[in-house]
Image: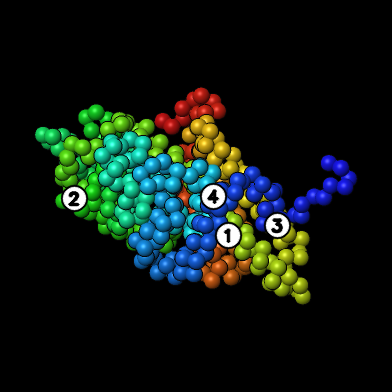
């Protein structure tokens, strides 16, 4: 660089210049989702969270369908066919509004739609995916059970053959979108191994009571799935997979979105803390002018943008077909853990105001407590990485 070359100005919102890595199409996706979330979620989400409800979920799903956010990284069947990086940017913007909104999109696209798209028959794809991409049908994904979360191989939900039909019995727990879903992808034990089933939620014997009394992900619909002798035709089974590799591959795809999404929650808290520190005065001047506050903000910025860089790197690997599940565990473990720390540090800068729903900080912090453990606890991802690093399996 010559002495006469002019450096670009330092951008506090993008201190590492990460936007330089993005294509115009990437920026367009990000800006579209950010504008939608700013208009449709942010003015209402504190009220939804306080009441513990998401009353407009069906309307939001259709709007998300219109902007191409549902199943957006899938090809065909009305899906946007976006890149992995573009999908990640969308997750970041959605979770900057609220983790519950990103969860709605992740479960719809990365779990329910992804399972049908990757493992379903052509008839299943044609029947469900276009309507799900449009938001006309909401989907859910039934894997976790009341007594079996981190150990899905021990699930008790069972599907048995009865003539040409299948009959499903069992329970699933902590299912996002469950009570508003029109279709559920349910995983069950069979004589052949674990199989996935596409279950219309109006099937006799299927019910989805909503789970209440949550102190996290309150602006999200969470349910139990109850299957009492649910009879399905032979073609309800996902034909292209047998075994846990089916649901685990879906989880890996969804975890990738969390790698980005957690940084959205962290960014919201960080930006709130910066704005507050510049306007809140103590001892005659803004608290942002004190060394200890600046140290906190600097550390938060470093971890936030390291996390975004990590998410971007994993996205490029996914787009190149080179992303391994262990690398997704790396991202989920680091980014959610650091996002929680950023939220907690932001709370200290806001002081007592940090616990008020007038600010997003405590809402994000409590939401991330769920994100920390769903789709793989900290311990599970540590053991995934431990096995990859040593070659030794410590799960059992």
Which colour style is shown? rainbow
Residue 306 location (% of width, % of height)? 64, 45
Checking the image for residue 203, the label placed there is 2
The residue pinned by badge 4 equals 89
In the rendered image, the vertical position of residue 339 relative to residue 385, given as above or below: below
How far, Cα to Cα, is label 2 from label 3?
53 Å
- Secondary structure beneath dot 1 equals helix
In the rendered image, the vertical position of residue 292 relative to residue 248, given as above or below: below
Residue ID at (49%, 61%): 36
Q: Badge 1 local density, few (<14 within 10 Å), some, or many (20+)?
A: many
Is tag 1's residue or tag 3's residue first in the polypeptide sequence? 3
Q: Residue furthest bottom?
A: 284
Is tag 2's residue or tag 3's residue first in the polypeptide sequence? 3
- Secondary structure beneath dot 2 equals loop
How far, Cα to Cα, is label 4 from label 1?
14 Å
Q: Nearer the viewer, mark 4 or mark 2?
A: 4
Q: Nearer the viewer, mark 4 or mark 3?
A: 4
Q: Badge 3 local density, few (<14 within 10 Å), some, or many (20+)?
A: few
Residue ID at (52%, 57%): 32
Residue ID at (88%, 47%): 4
Front residue of 180/389: it is: 180
The residue pinned by badge 1 equals 268
- Secondary structure beneath dot 3 equals loop
Checking the image for residue 154, the label placed there is none
How far, Cα to Cα, is label 1 from label 2?
41 Å
Q: Badge 4 local density, few (<14 within 10 Å), some, or many (20+)?
A: many
Is tag 4's residue or tag 3's residue first in the polypeptide sequence? 3
Residue 320 location (% of width, % of height)? 53, 33
């Amino acid at each position: 660089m010559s002495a006469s070359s002019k450096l670009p100005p330092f951008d506090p919102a993008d201190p590492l210049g990460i936007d330089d890595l993005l294509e115009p199409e990437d920026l367009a996706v990000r800006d579209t989702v950010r504008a939608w979330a700013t208009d449709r979620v942010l003015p209402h989400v504190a009220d939804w969270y306080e009441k513990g409800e998401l009353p407009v979920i069906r309307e939001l799903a259709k709007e998300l369908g219109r902007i191409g956010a549902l199943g957006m990284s899938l090809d065909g069947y009305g899906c946007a066919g976006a890149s992995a990086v573009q999908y990640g940017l969308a997750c970041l913007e959605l979770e900057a509004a609220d983790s519950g909104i990103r969860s709605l999109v992740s479960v719809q696209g990365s779990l329910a739609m992804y399972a049908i798209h990757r493992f379903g028959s052509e008839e299943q794809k044609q029947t469900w995916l276009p309507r799900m991409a449009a938001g006309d049908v909401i989907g859910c994904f039934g894997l976790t059970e009341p007594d079996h979360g981190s150990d899905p191989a021990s699930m008790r939900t069972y599907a048995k053959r009865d003539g040409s039909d299948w009959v499903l019995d069992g329970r699933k727990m902590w299912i996002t979108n469950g009570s508003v879903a029109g279709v559920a992808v349910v995983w069950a034990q069979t004589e052949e191994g674990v199989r996935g089933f596409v279950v219309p939620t109006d099937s006799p014997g299927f019910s989805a009571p909503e789970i209440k009394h949550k102190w996290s992900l309150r602006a999200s619909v969470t349910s139990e799935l109850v299957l009492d002798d649910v009879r399905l035709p032979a073609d309800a089974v996902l034909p292209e997979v047998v075994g846990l590799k089916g649901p685990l591959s879906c989880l890996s795809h969804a975890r990738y979105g969390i790698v980005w999404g957690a940084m959205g929650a962290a960014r919201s808290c960080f930006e709130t803390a910066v704005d507050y520190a510049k306007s809140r005065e103590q001892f005659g001047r803004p608290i942002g002018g004190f060394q200890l506050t600046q140290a906190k903000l600097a550390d938060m910025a470093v971890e936030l943008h390291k996390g975004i860089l990590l998410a971007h790197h994993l996205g490029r690997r996914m787009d190149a077909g080179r992303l391994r599940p262990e690398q997704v565990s790396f991202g989920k473990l680091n980014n959610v853990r650091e996002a929680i720390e950023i939220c907690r540090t932001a709370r200290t800068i806001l002081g007592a105001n940090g616990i008020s729903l007038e600010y997003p900080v405590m809402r994000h912090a409590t939401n991330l407590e769920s994100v920390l453990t769903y789709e793989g606890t900290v311990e599970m991802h540590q053991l995934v990485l431990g096995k990859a690093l040593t070659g030794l399996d410590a799960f059992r």
